[in-house]
Image: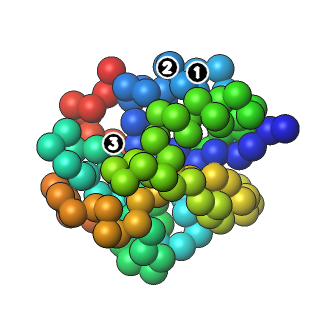
């Protein structure tokens, strides 16, 4: 069964985790979250994190993919779903470039899990020194 996945950080094209995890997935379009959320760099390695606080921050820009069950399972392992320092997978409304709305999985963290913020709120994760 295919799933829609919205990625905003290191899983995007040109970033470190894309080739190993989404290179074979079907790219649908660029998009943005319908609602505003905080996107920040977190921790000593400056990881991009989308924080589960609806209505704060920006509509976050990213990429929309269609993935199969095997890819979704591999992404869940990569993002350490529900570990204390891992992510939670949530469904969010995403708008593509044609203004069509989609329901897609997104990896997020509760605000209590994001203690070491290293940036201002961002609309998009596009820092060149994190690219491969």
Q: Residue at x 15, y 43 (%)?
A: 44
Q: Specify the label residue 23 is tagged with.
A: 1
Mark 1 neighbour density, 10 Å: few (under 14) some (14–19) many (20 or more): few
Q: Position of residue 8 (x, y in %)?
A: 46, 47
Q: Residues within 10 Å of mark 3 (few under 14, many from 20)?
A: some
Placement of the N terminus among the 4 image quadrants: top right
Contact between marks 2 and 1 (CB within 8 A): the answer is: yes
Left or right? Give the position of 68 relative to 88.
Answer: right
**Horizontal arrangement in the rendering, residue 78 relative to residue 63 (left or right):** left
Residue 58: quarter of image: bottom left
Task: Tell me which numbered mark, 1 or 3, is placed earlier along the sequence.
Answer: 1
Query: Which secondary structure, mark 2?
Result: helix
Query: Which colour scheme appears in the figure?
Result: rainbow
Q: Position of residue 128 (x, y in %)?
A: 26, 33
Most extreme residue toward the bottom is 55
Q: Disc 2 and disc 1: Cα gap in Å? A: 5 Å
Q: Which mark is residue 126?
A: 3
């Amino acid at each position: 069964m295919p799933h829609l996945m919205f990625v905003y950080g290191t899983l995007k094209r040109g970033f470190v985790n894309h080739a190993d995890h989404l290179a074979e997935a079907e790219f649908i379009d660029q998009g943005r979250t319908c609602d505003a959320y905080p996107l920040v760099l977190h921790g000593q390695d400056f990881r991009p994190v989308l924080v589960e606080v609806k209505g704060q921050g920006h509509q976050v820009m990213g990429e929309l993919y269609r993935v199969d069950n095997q890819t979704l399972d591999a992404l869940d392992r990569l993002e350490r779903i529900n570990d204390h320092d891992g992510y939670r997978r949530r469904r969010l409304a995403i708008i593509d470039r044609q203004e069509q709305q989609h329901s897609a999985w997104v990896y997020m963290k509760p605000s209590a899990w994001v203690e070491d913020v290293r940036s201002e709120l961002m609309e998009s994760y596009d820092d060149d020194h994190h690219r491969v």
